[in-house]
Amino acid sequence: MKRKKRDCVAQSDRTGGEETEPPGQVPVAICEPPPPIRRMESSPNQLSPGHSPASRFRKSVSNLFKSERSAAFAACFFPNSKASNWNDWRWQLRNRVRTPAELKRMIRAAPEEEAALSNPERRFPFAITPYYASLIDSDDPQQPLRRCVVPCTAEGLHGPGEEEDPLGEDGQSPAPGLVHRYPDRVLFLVTDFCSTYCRYCTRSRMVGHGGPGRNDVQTWQRALDYIERTPSVRDVLISGGDPLTLRDEQLEWLLSRLRRIPHVQILRIGSKVPAVLPQRITPTLTRMLRKYHPLWMSLHFTHPDEVTPETTEACERLADAGIPLGSQTVLLRGVNDDIDTMRRLFHGLMMARVRPYYLYQCDPIVGSTHFRTSVQKGLEILEGLRGHTTGYAVPHYVIDAPGGGGKIALVPNAVLGREGRNLLLRNYQGHTCRYPDVI
Ligand code: SF4
């Protein structure tokens, strides 16, 4: 990824004291207001090479998540932080970019971003981890990663057919935080908190709003009670918000309660954390997770620029813990809606031991028009991948049907017709092939 040199418009550091672990046992919400920003006087760009904060940061960086990009960014915007701060996921959460003023220190806001950031009516909060902010282009408002996390005025428009809850999840909820749509599995929304908010989020109606009773043990218990008294449920997908933003003991509390239910065979976790907060994937976490197999993970990735050395390391740790990893990608206009970008993303994920699993047509949430492509575009991308690369790198392309109809898989039409007993098929090169069908 080509990166432009950043100007340090201003600097701040909020390293402060370490967050103390909240008391164990009882799960609580993790979100805390950030400490105040302390502005610094000098600019690291004025320092001589070799004596810059970036070089000092690099010298002390651990072997786990070393990257020139992170070092330069941290030196610029968090000059008093150490590598151990940067590599601490709790530090990353405490120092999330959450206000327009913080963000505008790091990027030159375009008019449509500026207007959205200063709009008090903005319905969906924004937050970006320092790590993910280090991947954002400070000058280009069209950079794919920037478009995914920085608000713009288009998300305030209500397009035709768009709804707050297009998948009808609220109508298929037998208990708070639980969605029971398919016969043998449930979606368990255990938190409304994410470390970084995606502007196209299907659950923007509920995530990041600090809604009542989402993250507390009483609410979780009501969902667990429903699962326990419903023997048809053999598979539980833990999602949110992002469940990997819970503390280890909170997550273990949930996993252990679910494992006690005899008919629950499969546990799955849906998360974007490896892409936006890879520091969260600690050896302690993976040691805990491996106790609850069979445990699978669906990881949310959008663009090949997210597949960094840090993210790859995080995915490898999960894979080494025996967790099968699949990816979920939303098809987004101007972000990943071309064959080359998708191919690079899926190849990068396979190198990180993540199997591309689902490519989603963007759900028609309110304010998503600028992100949505035609379905034909998705089919073209699928056609450009299938046969041209390994089938492992070709995900299922699905529409999550509005109104709660569930996922519907779409494939380019390969059946051209019949010729006597032969089925006429179109191969990946566009050639017609004949298969002697059994009639
Ligand atoms: S990580 Fe998932 S739940 Fe959180 S904002 Fe992004 S899409 Fe929504």
Image (cartoon, rainbow, N blue to C red):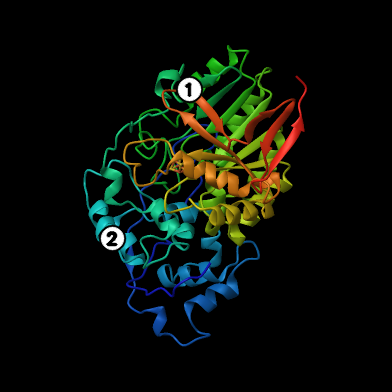
Q: Which residue is mark 2?
A: 101
Q: In this orientation, which residue lies closer to the viewer: 166 or 107? A: 166
Q: CA distance from mark 2 to mark 1?
A: 42 Å
Dot 1: within a 10 Å radius of its alpha carbon, few (fewer than 14), some, or many (20 or more) residues?
few
Indicate the position of residue 412 as horizontal and vertical percent values: 58, 38
**Image-quadrant location for residue 340:** bottom right
- Secondary structure beneath dot 1 equals loop
Residue under the image location 41 percent in, 40 percent down: 201
Q: Which mark is residue 405?
A: 1
Dot 2 or dot 1, earlier in sequence:
2
Residue type marked 1: Gly
The label on residue 21 is: none
State the image quarter where residue 304 is shown: bottom right
Q: Secondary structure at mark 2?
A: helix
Q: Is residue 66 above or below residue 320?
A: below
On-image quarter of the C terminus:
top right
Q: Residue at x 64, y 28 (%)?
A: 256
Image spot of residue 28 (x, y percent):
46, 35
Label 2: few (<14), some (14–19) or many (≥20) C-alpha neighbours in 10 Å: few
Amino acid at pointer 2: Ala
- Image x and y of residue 429, in percent: 66, 49
